Amino acid sequence: MASIQDFSGYQPTWCPGCGDWGIGMAIKKALVELNYSPDQVAVVFGIGCSGNMNDFLNAYGLHSLHGRALPNAIGIKLANHKLPVLAVVGDGDCYGEGGNHFIHACRGNHDITVIVHDNGVYGLTTGQSAPTALKGYRSKSTPLGLIEAPVNPLALALTSGVTFVAQGFAGDLNHLVLILKEAITHKGFSLVNVLQPCVTFNKVNTYQYYLQRVYKLDKDYQKDNFKLALDKALEVNEEKFPLGVIYQVKRPCYHESLPQTSSLPLVEKKRFLEYDSLIKEFI
Amino acid sequence: MTFTWKIGGEAGFGIMTTGLLFSKIASRLGYYILDYVEYPSLIRGGHNAYEVCVSDKEVTALKKNIDVLVCLNEETFHKHKNRLTSQSLVLYDKEEFDFTDNFNKINVSLKKILTDLKGQAVMKNTIALGASLSILGGKIEVLLDLIAEQFKKKGDEIVRFNQQFAIAGYEEVKKNYSFLIKNFLIEKEEKQEKLVLSGNEAFSLGAVVSDCRLYAAYPMTPSSSVLHTLASWQEKTGMIVRHSEDEIAVINTALGASFAGVRAAVGTSGGGFSLMVESLSLAGVAEIPVVVFLAQRPGPATGMPTWTEQGDLLFAIFSGHGEFPKIVLAPGDQKEMIELTLKAFNLADIYQTPVIFVSDMYLSEGHKSVERDWVDKIVREYQIRRGKINLSQKENPQKLEIFLRYKVTEDGISEKILPGTAGYFYQENSYEHLEDGHTTEEAEPRKDQVEKRLRKWQTYLKNDFQLPKFYGNEKAEIVFISWGSTKGIVLEAQKRLKEKGIETGFYHFNHIYPLDKEKFSQLLKKDNKRYLLVENNALGQFGKILAMEAGLDFKEKILRYDGRPITVEEIIEKI
């Protein structure tokens, strides 16, 4: 059985106190507790402080471009659906630059787990406002205050046909591990939006800010109730943040719906050789 | 004997299907064909035309004169009558329009037959095909067979219903115009089975034979029919054919699949390719094999979507930020399309880098005859070469080990094991990285990796690059230079010039970039030669590459950039 140590690459370079430390540890713990070892997992990283986890997490990794981790993850899953596929991305990465991919990955119910570091800022490029930043947020790129309303990732995912939506908090590691385990085990597209304080650039959404506003969903919360889930997703408008699995339903995932990958993974299949039947079409 | 049959009518009324049927009829009767389609970027309302050049021997270019013009509407006649001669036959319906020009009139009562037999508007095409076969001396059975194949799923009644339109057209012409009937399509006694293949279909077939297992695309003319063809085959071939949300997703899905170990390709035209190029650079640095099928059309921006141009060559060669090796190939015709597709997938794997495979509307959408035996042979003999991509499980190390995915090697290529291989792990990285894939900003490893990657080009030039093929007379003073789809047109021009007693030579490039300048620059630097560059673009883009790489300067250029293919006649005029 693999250990946390086996999954640990370089010593992280995140700022002391950054929420990414909690997320990084939670991912490793979840994988260990699910009995995976680094040679059995594929992880795609976006670009940003979140994506820098590529050097800190041992796995078959693909450190991709800003915004493009999701289509990469989909490609990996289509080619080898035996591998669990995780995408470790940021809010600007996934909801901004890669927003289109996000919507369509939800629709397709591709069996990948998307872990979004949601800190409301672009940390790695020194703190410009991200799509989840609150209206009026002042940053280097929006010195007069952000005009746009924030993206609501949970609601966006729900209305795009997602089958698993959860929210975690980087300040509650044990709870995050539980969520991640459920997300990785879920058959289909799973979104884990992790509230993650950026201690260097975001002076609004701090640990204190979240500690006062997060709450865990009840044990008897009906997670297959779409309307209830949407209500929970909209609570962000009142600056309330439910934690836990907000929505989960069963629907065949993309590769299961393809006859090509209904059994063996694409990479393991025998080569097709019946060219005659194709050639005949051109006679 | 070589003749051109052309049909025109309103867009949305089956002209494309009809044209292709004519090509197949001629092919089944034992002839060679080359066809070309003109259509606007509309579904309904514009003008569609389809011409088929038919001959006893291989056809490599279109012909200036139209021998049989089938006018399903009046516009067809006016648009194309400048290519008719006094010998030409014009098939039309007097009820629709009439003309006084001095061509051979074949009046077919398309409208009346349609009404009498209670047919739908598209069945005019079937009547016209029957009438065409009649006047060309072909036998109707070939058309009836094709109709039967097309409608067999819908039952015998539907088959017979459709066939009667063909028969009606055939019989009417036979009755009224027996004195004009030609022997152009008499069935050949000795026939070689041939495929009627468009460039896109040739690529599709090649991709399947190459064991490409994932093809992703976003529809874009003129590449879309690759998506359609491969999608229609997917249940049979097992290839995953994915229409993603945009071209950025398209290439990144392919890169993900390739990372996981399967051969993957994408297809697009210039606009979609523009969206892909950041990710092409990712493929370059992360060393992920991918084949990019780039079917050009006239740009910039939306340009002229359904017409042809070779205007994206420089863009393809220089696509992607940063310096990384890529290989650019451009087939000259359908046969080269198959051959080079097979090679492209091998090269992508061997060099673990993107291969850009350049076509254009003229080659992609036009059909050409390819002998069945030739296809069978090349398919049978194809060897998959995956280079240093190690598909087998490695010996399991005592304890988990990081695999040196980017090990510095002499040939620039590092071993890759597949994600999921027990006992190891590694990352492929868009950042500059160390041999083990970890991100680095240190000077020395950066230099090592840049040089390692660029060494792949040297290895390619040594092992897999091919010099341009030479056609014609080596002693000739006149030498044409071209690349890609202009090949057949130059070959035909050479043939016609020779008939006039003018000897020429012709270097045709299909291995476009990188170029081994040591090898080829000597070929093209002879003082006593007159070099003519032939390209379907305004800038003479390949000429610029030859200038950059080998200091060649072309004083004479035959360029065309109005969306139409270059013609044999305009080449001959320049001599």
Image: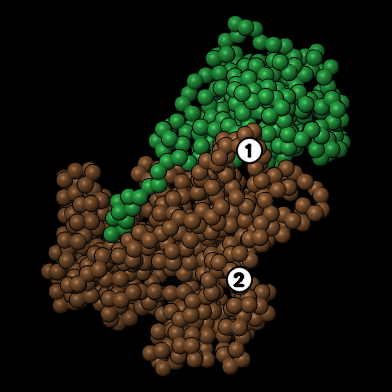
Chain colours: A green, B brown
Note whether B274 is above or below B187 in the view shown: above
Q: Position of residue A71 (x, y in %)?
A: 59, 39
Note whether A188 is above or below B4 in the view shown: above
Q: Amino acid at mark 1?
A: Phe
Q: Position of residue A92 (x, y in %)?
A: 72, 35
Q: Which mark is residue B515?
A: 2
Q: Which mark is residue B181?
A: none
Specify whether B573 is left or right of A178: left
Q: SS for tag 1? A: strand
The N terminus of chain B sits in image quarter? bottom left
To which residue does mark 1 refer?
Answer: B425
Q: Position of residue B256 (x, y in %)?
A: 57, 42
Q: SS for tag 2? A: loop
Q: Position of residue B100 (x, y in %)?
A: 30, 76
Q: Residue at x 56, y 89 (%)?
A: B530
Specify whether A191 is left or right of B121: right
Question: Can you name the residue that lies furthest to the left here?
Answer: B175
Note whether A48 is above or below B224 in the view shown: above
Answer whether residue B141 is visible to the viewer in this image.
yes
Neighbourhood count class around disc 2 (C-alpha, 10 Å): few under 14, some 14–19, many 20 upward: many
Q: Residue at x 40, y 43 (%)?
A: A270
Question: Can you name the residue that lies furthest to the front here?
Answer: B398
Q: What is the C-alpha distance between the residues marked 1 and 2?
A: 36 Å
- Closer to the camera in the image, B336 or B133: B336
Q: Amino acid at mark 2?
A: Leu
Determine which quarter of the picture holds residue B53.
bottom left
Q: Residue at x 47, y 69 (%)?
A: B332
Neighbourhood count class around disc 1 (C-alpha, 10 Å): few under 14, some 14–19, many 20 upward: many
